[in-house]
Image (tube, grey):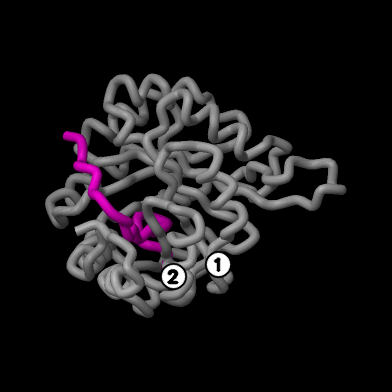
Amino acid sequence: MEAPVKKGVNVIPVFDLLHTKVKLTECAPDIEEGQDPVDMARQVSLGGADEVAFIDVDIPRLGFKIWKEIISKLKEAVDIPVWFGYSMNTYEDFEVILNTGVDRVVIDVIGNTDQSIIDRLSWTFNKERIVVAVGGVKNPPESGRPEIELVHHLDKMPTGMNLIDWLKMAEYFGAGAILLSSYDTIGTGEGFDIEMIKAVTSAISVPVIAYGGAGELEHFYEVVKETGVRGVAATSVFTSGKFRPSEIKEFLESKKIEVAQ
């Protein structure tokens, strides 16, 4: 069933999953540590999150099939929409996960991603359930590279592809939302990449969720005010316990920003 789209700005915790656990630190991939995703989902749901996203970052990937039971437990544990992504590589993979009842799938973008998958999924399952995740870097004019360049999420290497052009094509094929990260700011705690996000929101009409870089409440307000994003997403401020989703929403409301209820 399609999750309803809430009016107002959504606050969305995004958690990386390593060895089926929420990854709490930037440790080596072969170190097993972390929190149970079901417990984390309950925590942020009770803390006021509008939706919650889980991103499988295992390399090599364990395979999407191991997540079917976990997704079922997540759906039983919380009453907010659940996202899941990154383990699926084919249309059939996405189909299996969507049929588990997960509310939205996250399609991770690499340079050779087959955009026709977006088209098929949006027609079959409704575009609101299809989220495209992208990351980019800004390049100086004299570099000879795209001004905003799409980055391969696995090795963090630039692809030579123009991020804006790629997202216009994803919009054409039926992407329901964009989860946008800037590798210039993610993990810094110094704020979102306003310049990059504004360039994207000015170029496409698909809802954009800004992800990565926030460390203070003011950062969430700045990105909404300056770019018009439909959602804000973060990881470390939630895994560290620095903020609850409700605190971010209350701060935005204090600044006259409408938030999802």
Sequence-first disc among 2 and 1: 1
Residue appearing at x 33%, y 64% in the figure: 257
- Tag 2 and tag 1, C-beta contact below 8 Å: yes
* Local crowd size for mark 2, using a 10 Å CA cut-off: few (<14), some (14–19), many (≥20): many
Q: Is residue 112 left or right of residue 245?
A: right
Q: Is residue 208 above or below residue 205?
A: below
- Measured from the top left, where is residue 115 in percent x and y? 51, 25
> Within the magenta stretch, is there residue 9?
yes
Classed neighbour count for the residue bearing mark 1: other residues with Cα under 10 Å, few (<14), some (14–19), many (≥20): some
* The N terminus lies in quadrant: top left
- Can you tell which quarter of the image residue 41 is in? bottom left
User: What residue sits 26% from the left and 49% below the top?
Assistant: 82
Q: Secondary structure at mark 1?
A: loop
Q: What secondary structure is marked by label 2?
A: helix
Q: Tell me where residue 168 sits by quadrant.
A: top right
In whole angstroms, how far apart are the C-alphas of marks 2 and 1? 8 Å
The residue segment tinted magenta is 1-24
Q: Position of residue 69 (x, y in %)?
A: 22, 45
Q: Which residue is mark 2?
A: 236
> What's the mark number on residue 187?
1
Q: Which residue is at 47% across, 30% downward?
A: 171
Quadrant containing the C terminus in the rendered view:
bottom left
Q: For the view shown, which residue lies furthest in the right direction?
A: 142
